[in-house]
């Protein structure tokens, strides 16, 4: 069965731009919840911690591309696989950039602006 969740590149970009803002804001909120003793499951907290760790590494978007293109074998899908893996890397970059923006806003004492 074929499933086309993103019929066009433009739809992928528009949807993931919103997701990137949400993801960065969620990471920020969850990092503050953990200090207060969250009731979230350990599995969810562990996965979030792993994502935050990966985003602290240099060039997290390149790592995301390499993971999906080589480890998950996106190269087997030809040009479409390359494009999809590149779009996933861009999504990771948007999350990383928004996370830095939120951190800078917090340091300056500014209220966080939504997406």
Image: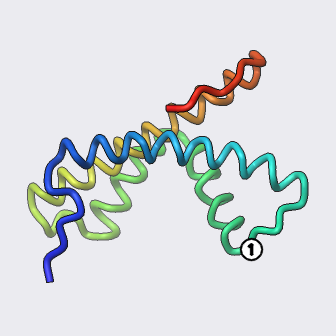
Total numbered circles: 1
Farthest bottom residue? 1
Residue with the most extreme left position: 79
Give x and y (percent) for residue 43: 68, 74
Q: Residue at label 1? A: 41
Mark 1, other Cα within 10 Å: few <14 / some 14–19 / many ≥20: few
Q: Residue at x 60, y 30 (%)?
A: 100
- Residue 67 image offset from top left, x and y in percent: 38, 61
Looking at the image, which is closer to me, 110 or 88?
Answer: 110
Question: Secondary structure under badge 1?
Answer: loop
As drawn, which residue projects farthest toward the right?
36
Q: Is residue 34 above or below residue 96?
A: below
**At x 36% / y 46%, what residue is drawn?**
16
Colour scheme in the image? rainbow
Q: Nearer the viewer, residue 71 or 87?
A: 87
Rendered-image quadrant of the N terminus: bottom left
Question: Is 20 left or right of 102, judged from the image as shown?
Answer: left
Q: Could you say where residue 11 lies in the image, as x and y percent from the top left?
A: 22, 46
Along the viewing direction, whichever of 64 and 16 lies nearer the viewer: 16
Q: Is residue 31 above or below residue 75?
A: above
Residue placed at 89% from the left, 60% from the top?
37
Rendering coords of residue 82 (x, y %): 18, 54
Left or right of 78, for residue 25: right
| Identity of the residue drawn at 63% across and 30% down | 102
């Amino acid at each position: 069965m074929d499933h086309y969740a993103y019929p066009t590149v433009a739809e992928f970009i528009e949807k993931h731009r919103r997701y990137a803002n949400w993801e960065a804001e969620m990471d920020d909120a969850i990092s503050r919840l953990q200090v207060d003793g969250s009731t979230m499951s350990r599995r969810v907290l562990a996965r979030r911690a792993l994502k935050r760790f990966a985003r602290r590494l240099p060039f997290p978007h390149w790592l995301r591309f390499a993971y999906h293109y080589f480890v998950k074998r996106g190269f087997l899908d030809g040009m479409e696989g390359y494009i999809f893996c590149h779009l996933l890397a861009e999504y990771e970059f948007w999350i990383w950039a928004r996370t830095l923006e939120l951190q800078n806003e917090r340091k300056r004492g500014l209220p966080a602006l939504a997406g």
